[in-house]
Image (tube, rainbow, N blue to C red):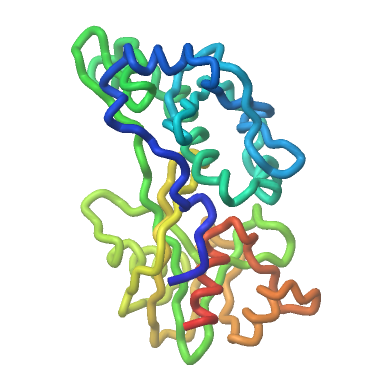
Amino acid sequence: MPPEIFFAGPGIDRADALRGEPGRIEALARSPDARQLMWADGLPALDGEGRLCWEPVTEPALFLGLDGEQACFSPVAAGGGDLRAQFGTLGHLSPSEAPLFAAAVSLATWHRRHGYCANCGSVSAIVRGGWSRQCGACGAEHYPRVDPVVIMLAEKDGRVLLGRQPRFPSGRYSALAGFVEVGESIEAAVAREMLEEAGVRVTDVRYVASQPWPFPSSLMIACLSTTADEAITIDTTELEDARWFSRADVEAAMAGDPEAAFVAPPPFAIAHSLLAHWLAA
């Protein structure tokens, strides 16, 4: 397995058994040691050590769970700003705090975007401590969505295929990725995305690890694959460039060598962990 995946740690006790007991959640919110996340610029606020900032509970919309005996909440904070610019925050976020950060961001974003019933269009209300919404008109209950995304490397003769999008920082290359479509397996999604984006046919798809990615609610599914194809035909609507890189190229990039052939993805991205796993395999 790859090194510990950012965002993927255990976090706190989500206390699912309490979600159906609104009276108990309300009592926990009134407890003097209960706390709620502070938000700033559309994300949970961090202190100078990269840890989450907390304050006394004032609007316990979302019950995040229990940290020992201490109840943790979050408001449905207002979003805003350029998320790509906010990614700089992740470079300061403590890995031990990352799972709770991810849960809070995904949950709050879902509530902001899903205030109406998808069944009848009526206004829905927060229930189960914020882990679902219920329509007062038709009774339908809706749960936070998770969008599966495959992210993968194709390997040939000791080299891996990496690509870059126009929005990437200068010199950065990363693993190719794409959403899993309805009626599609993980393996089929890897093969389809590789063919669509790079014109490469892959086989022997192997699952490596997964990562919750809270921008807004993806589950990144990292895989390796094998190909006999050498030629690359990129889809320019998806990629700016794609290239084969040797093991030495990847080692230099992962070490931060300024003379490396490319700039590696940041440590908080699962693409970084996937490359580390490939190097160690």
Q: In which image quadrant can residue 189 be found?
A: bottom left
For residue 82, above or below residue 180: above
For residue 199, above or below residue 110: below
Q: What is the x, y in percent for residue 84? A: 65, 44
For residue 184, above or below residue 28: below
Left or right of 70? Residue 25 is left
| 156 vs 16, nearest the viewer | 16
Q: What is the x, y in percent for residue 192? A: 34, 65
Q: What is the x, y in percent for residue 19? A: 31, 24
| 2 vs 108, nearest the viewer | 2
Left or right of 220? Residue 267 is right
Q: What is the x, y in percent for residue 65? A: 42, 31
Residue at the spot 42% in from the left edge and 76% down from the top edge: 200
| 124 vs 103, nearest the viewer | 103
Residue at the spot 66% in from the left edge and 32% down from the top edge: 45
Residue at the spot 64% in from the left edge and 87% down from the top edge: 248
